[in-house]
Amino acid sequence: MVLASSVDIASAAALRAELDTALAAGRPIELDAGDTGRVDGAALQLLAAFAAAARRRGLGLRWSRVHPNVAAGAALLGLAEALGVGGRADA
């Protein structure tokens, strides 16, 4: 799943619907945030909740690319480990 270039509270409802669909599919999930240059705390919290739900369901979750802003925001909020982006910045 490729995340938009801007992921914030304004797009959280649409993102949640996409994430819920991915969970319902029951397959390993790959997220690409390589072009996500703008992300806010609400979106990072949503992604952390999604990552936790994927783990509870036993689904694999991996990041193909992580924009430095996503990694930095996650680190700032203490969510890097929960998201699995600690030390990542690929774009």
Image: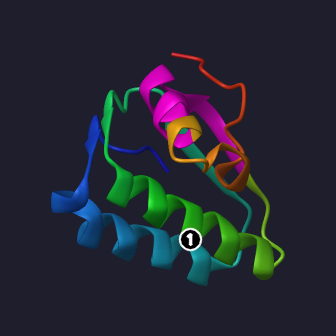
Q: Where does the image place residue 42, in percent across and percent down from the top left?
A: 34, 60
Q: Is residue 53 left or right of residue 3?
A: right
Question: What is the quadrant of residue 6 in the picture?
Answer: top left
Q: How many marks?
A: 1
- Classify 57 as above or below 72: below
- Classify 21 as above or below 43: below
Which residue appears farthest toward the left when viewing the image?
10
Q: Where does the image place residue 68, in percent across and percent down from the top left?
A: 49, 21
Secondary element at tag 1? helix
Is the residue marked by circle 1 packed among few (<14), some (14-19), or many (20+) residues within 10 Å?
A: some
Residue at 39 percent of width and 45 percent of height:
3
Q: Nearer the viewer, residue 36 or 28?
A: 36
Q: Where does the image place residue 51, in percent across and percent down from the top left?
A: 64, 64
**Which residue matches tag 1?**
49
Question: What is the quadrant of residue 65 in the picture?
Answer: top right
Which residue appears farthest toward the top when viewing the image?
91
Give amino acid for label 1: Ala
Residue at 79 percent of width and 61 percent of height:
60
Q: Where does the image place residue 55, in percent across and percent down from the top left?
A: 78, 71
Name the colour scheme: rainbow
Q: Is residue 80 left or right of residue 39?
A: right
Question: What is the quadrant of residue 37 in the picture?
Answer: top left
Residue at 45 percent of width and 53 percent of height:
44
Residue at 61 percent of width and 47 percent of height:
78
Q: Nearer the viewer, residue 66 or 9?
A: 9
Q: Nearer the viewer, residue 40 or 66?
A: 40
Which residue appears farthest toward the right when viewing the image?
58
Residue 82, magenta (yes or no): no
Q: Point out the stretch of residues depicted in magenta.
A: 62-74
